[in-house]
Image: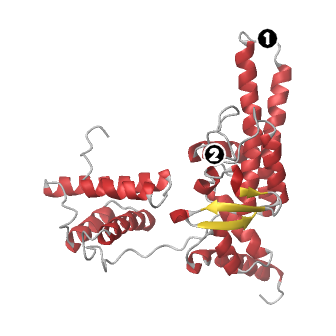
Amino acid sequence: MGNEAPLAEEVQEFLDYLSAERSASAYTIRNYRQTLVEFDQWYRDTFKTAPDWIRLKREDFRSYLRHLGAMNLKRAPISLRFSALRSFYKFLIRRGILETTPIKDLSMPKQEKRLPRFLTVEQTLALLDAPFTELKNIEKARKQKTEKEKDARKAAFKYNQRVHSCWRDQAILETFYSCGLRISELCGMKVQDISFNTQSLRVLGKGKKERIVPIGNHALKAIQRYWKQLDHPPQPNEPVFWSGHETPKPPTPRLIQFNLKKYLALAGLDPTLTPHKLRHSFATHILDAGGDLRSVQELLGHEHIATTQIYTHITVERLKKVYNKAHPHA
C-alpha cells in the first residue's frame, strides 16, 4: 500500500460524496476505493501513464474486462468491480463533468444464479441461545479458578466486559433476526429510534432512506436486559448497542462478524456464515409462513422488487423438495 499512487481529484471527490451524501457504509467505500485503485494500477502497468478518468474510452474498459477474465476471476467479482466503476461515472455525469459513461453497453459476464444461504428456524433459535451458553461457560470458568488473580481490578473488568458482550450480542442477534436489518443499519441504531409502545423501529437505510419496521417482543426484552448491564442507562441520542460496557460507542461491523463466528460454532453451525445470512433467514422464514413479497420488500428496504424476488426461488425450491418427497406420483 505504501507504493500506491495518489488518488485522482475526481476519485477522492466521489469517495467523499459516498460518505457525506450517500451515507454509504465503510465496507462499501472501502470496496469502491479498492476497485478504482486497482483499475488505476492496471492502467499504469499497461499504458505506462496514469488514467485520465474524464477521457477514458469504452475500449479501455473492454481491455480491462479482458484482463479480469484472463485472471480467471469469477463472474460475481467482475460484476462488482464494474458496478463500482458505473457508480463513479454516474457521479461524474450528475456533477456535469461528463455527458455519458464510457462503460455504456459493455457486455458483462452473465451472473450465476446463486440462492442466498440461510438458517432454518431451528438453527436460528439455536444461534439465538448461543450467547446464553457462553455466559454459562464464563461463570463456570470463573468458579473453577483456584489461583488468586494478580490484579483483581483487571480481572473484574475483564469479567464484566465478557458478560456485557454476551448480553449485547444476544440482543444484537435477536434484533437482526426480528427486523431483517443490514449490519450497517444495526450499528447505526439509536435509542430514540425504538418505540417500545408501538413495537416499531425507525431504520436509516441506504441513501439515508428511512423506513419503519416492526420489532418483536423477544428483541425488545433482550435489549432491555442488555441495557441493565451498562454502567448507566443509554440516552436517546446514544447507540442502542455499545462496543464496551462503559462508553457509548457503537460496535463495528467487524466486531459483530467476529463474535458471530463464535456463536455459530457454539451452536454447532457453519462459522463462515455472515450477519447478512440472518437477513436472508428473516426474509425466507416470513415468506415460508405466508408473507407476501411486497411486504418483505418494504421490511428489507429494497428499492426494487426484483431484488426481493430471489427469496421466492428459495421457497419454491423447498416446496419442490417437499413435493418430490411426499407426492406418490412426483
Q: Earlier in the sequence, mark 2 or mark 1?
A: 1
Q: How many marks?
A: 2
**In the rendered image, which quarter contains the N terminus?**
top left
Front one among 198 and 314: 198
User: Based on the displayed image, in which of its 4 quarters is residue 59 positioned?
Assistant: bottom left
**Color style of the picture:** secondary structure
Residue 244's disc is none
Q: Position of residue 83 (x, y in %)?
A: 40, 67
Residue 268, visible in the rendered structure: no
Q: Position of residue 107 (x, y in %)?
A: 33, 78
192 in relation to 142, above or below: below
228 in relation to 39, above or below: above
Type of residue at label 2? Ile
Q: Position of residue 254 (x, y in %)?
A: 57, 44
Residue matched to label 2: 256
Residue drawn at the location 68% of the way across and 70% of the way down: 299
156 in relation to 211, above or below: above
User: Based on the displayed image, in which of its 4 quarters is residue 326 positioned?
Assistant: bottom right
User: Considering the numbered disc 2 on the image, is that residue within a helix, a strand or a loop?
Assistant: helix
Residue matched to label 1: 147
Front one among 125 and 169: 169
Label 2 or label 1, whichever lies nearer to me, is: 2
Q: Position of residue 282 (x, y in %)?
A: 72, 65
**In the rendered image, which quarter contains the C terminus?**
bottom right
Query: Viewed as shown, does residue 146 lie left or right of 9?
Result: right
